[in-house]
Image: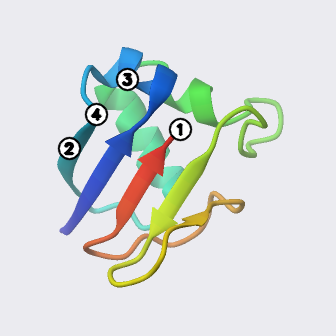
């Protein structure tokens, strides 16, 4: 089980009703995590993934920070997720 720190910015908080949370998951990629979070927060997947292509929405941003590293913008939704990572959904 991976322990992540999730942060939510701007309009994303209308779905989550929180700015950040500790989150446990067994998902291995950002894509799987977004799908799992859609179960917790209906509409989450639609906010970040274009249904016609399965790629990141152009008006959405996700930043991924592996433990001890500077967060970077996610381009590939199949990017792997490490235990202890911080992920910001904007």
Evaluate whether residue 19 shows in this view.
yes
- Viewer-closest of 52 and 82: 82
Q: Quadrant of residue 1?
A: bottom left
The residue shown at (47%, 52%) is 32
Q: Tags 1 and 3 in contact by the CB under 8 Å rule?
A: no
First along the sequence among labels 3 and 4: 3
User: Residue 15: horizontal and vertical position, in percent?
Assistant: 38, 18
Mark 1, Cα crowd under 10 Å, few <14 / some 14-19 / many 20+, is some
What's the colour scheme? rainbow
In space, the residues marked 4 and 1 are separated at their CA atoms by 11 Å
In space, the residues marked 1 and 2 are separated at their CA atoms by 15 Å
Left or right: where 86 falls relative to 23: right
- Viewer-closest of 64 and 26: 64
Evaluate whether residue 29 shows in this view.
no
Q: Tags 3 and 4 in contact by the CB under 8 Å rule?
A: yes
Q: Nearer the viewer, mark 2 or mark 4?
A: 4
Question: For mark 2, what is the residue?
Answer: 21
Question: For mark 3, what is the residue?
Answer: 13
Question: For mark 4, what is the residue?
Answer: 19
In space, the residues marked 2 and 4 are separated at their CA atoms by 7 Å
In space, the residues marked 3 and 2 are separated at their CA atoms by 11 Å
User: Residue 46: horizontal and vertical position, in percent?
Assistant: 60, 25
Mark 2, Cα crowd under 10 Å, few <14 / some 14-19 / many 20+, is few
* Residue 64 tag number: none
Left or right: where 83 falls relative to 36: left
* Residue 90 tag number: 1
User: Residue 29: horizontal and vertical position, in percent?
Assistant: 49, 64
């Amino acid at each position: 089980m991976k322990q992540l720190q999730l942060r939510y910015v701007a309009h994303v908080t209308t779905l989550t009703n929180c700015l950040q949370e500790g989150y446990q998951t067994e998902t291995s990629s950002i894509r799987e995590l977004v799908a799992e979070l859609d179960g917790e927060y209906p509409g989450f997947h639609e906010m970040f993934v274009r249904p016609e292509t399965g790629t990141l929405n152009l008006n959405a941003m996700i930043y991924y920070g592996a433990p001890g590293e500077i967060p970077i913008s996610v381009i590939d939704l199949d990017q792997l997720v490490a235990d202890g990572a911080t992920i910001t959904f904007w």
